[in-house]
Image: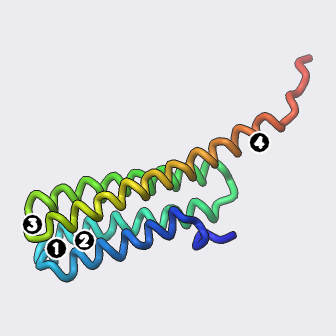
């Protein structure tokens, strides 16, 4: 299995495409700061899922998945800024914001799965006897 097989990564990739489409073709591209921030945050989700998946050390995996989840929240918040300031694309921003909810749930699932594996690994380690 590769990170490209993860449903969370696939959905994050779709989110990046939607964000780039929203920011490129709606007149929003004139607001360079907002465009850049939402684009970078969306790419961060996808990239951190991939990087976390590639890590072998479980705490590192969790850290990258946690960053992805944080970036997902940032994108969701920035989409409210878009909704509030660009009435012509308000509905599309709201639709994309719903995608962030789905991505967030998938990333949370990755984190829970990783936590579960970490707990099982800790339980499998024999306890040394106290002298």
Q: Residues within 10 Å of mark 4 (few under 14, many from 20)?
A: few
Sequence-wise first label, 2 or 3: 2
Q: Residue 18: percent from the left, percent from the top?
A: 32, 73
Circle on res. 36: 2
User: What residue lies at 30% left-to-right and 70% top-to-bottom?
Assistant: 39
Q: Residue 125: percent from the left, percent from the top?
A: 83, 37
Residue sitting nearer the eye, 102 or 39: 102
Instruction: Return the residue at label 1.
Output: 32
Residue 123 left/right relative to 17: right
> Does the CB distance between marks 4 and 1 fall below 8 Å?
no
Q: Which quarter of the picture shows residue 27? A: bottom left
Q: Which quarter of the picture shows residue 19? A: bottom left
> Does the CB distance between marks 3 and 1 fall below 8 Å?
no
User: What residue lies at 58% left-to-right and 66% top-to-bottom?
Assistant: 6
Residue sitting nearer the eye, 3 or 103: 103
User: What residue lies at 50% left-to-right and 54% top-to-bottom?
Assistant: 107
Q: Residue 33: percent from the left, percent from the top?
A: 17, 68
Which circle, 2 or 3, is nearer the viewer?
3
Q: How many marks?
A: 4
The answer for how far apart the CA atoms under marks 4 and 3 are is 49 Å
The answer for how far apart the CA atoms under marks 2 and 3 are is 16 Å
The N terminus - image quarter: bottom right
> Does the CB distance between marks 2 and 3 fall below 8 Å?
no
Sequence-wise first label, 4 or 2: 2
Which circle, 4 or 1, is nearer the viewer?
4
Secondary structure at badge 2 equals helix
Circle on res. 86: 3
Residue 12, relative to residue 131: is it above or below? below
């Amino acid at each position: 299995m590769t990170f490209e097989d993860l449903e969370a990564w696939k959905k994050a990739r779709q989110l990046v495409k939607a964000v780039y489409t929203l920011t490129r073709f709606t007149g929003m591209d004139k607001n360079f700061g907002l465009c850049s921030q939402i684009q970078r945050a969306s790419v961060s989700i996808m990239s951190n899922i991939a990087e976390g998946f590639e890590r072998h050390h479980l705490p590192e995996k969790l850290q990258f998945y946690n960053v992805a989840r944080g970036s997902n929240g940032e994108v969701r918040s920035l989409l409210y800024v878009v909704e509030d300031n660009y009435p012509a694309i308000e509905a599309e921003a709201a639709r994309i914001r719903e995608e962030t909810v789905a991505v967030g749930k998938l990333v949370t699932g990755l984190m829970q799965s990783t936590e579960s594996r970490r707990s099982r690994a800790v339980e499998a380690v024999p306890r040394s006897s106290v002298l």
